[in-house]
């Protein structure tokens, strides 16, 4: 049972990390585009 819990935890961690990465890349792109025009 504990193993399952740990697995879910690590899964959530990975999902959260990839989610954060996606958000960061989403914000990065417009910023780079804006910077290119300055």
Image (spheres, grey):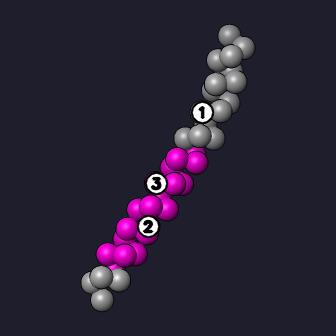
Q: Residue furthest left?
A: 2
- Give the quarter of the figure containing the N terminus: bottom left
Which type of secondary structure does the marked residue at label 1 adopt?
Answer: helix
- Quadrant where the C terminus lies? top right
Task: Verify whether residue 12 appears in magenta.
Answer: yes
**Label 1, on which residue?**
28
Q: Which residue is mark 2?
A: 12
The part of the chain drawn in magenta is: 5-23
Of the two numbered discs 2 and 1 on the same chain, state the one appearing first in sequence: 2
- Image quadrant in which you'd find residue 10: bottom left
Mark drawn on residue 6 = none
- Specify the quadrant of the image occupied by residue 14: bottom left
Q: Is residue 14 above or below residue 6?
A: above
**Which residue is under mark 3?**
17
Residue name at image x 63 percent, y 26 percent = 31
Q: Residue at x 33, y 80 (%)?
A: 5
CA separation, marks 1 and 3?
16 Å
């Amino acid at each position: 049972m504990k193993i399952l819990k740990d697995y879910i935890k690590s899964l959530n961690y990975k999902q959260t990390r990839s989610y954060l990465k996606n958000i960061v890349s989403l914000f990065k792109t417009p910023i780079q585009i804006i910077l290119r025009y300055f």
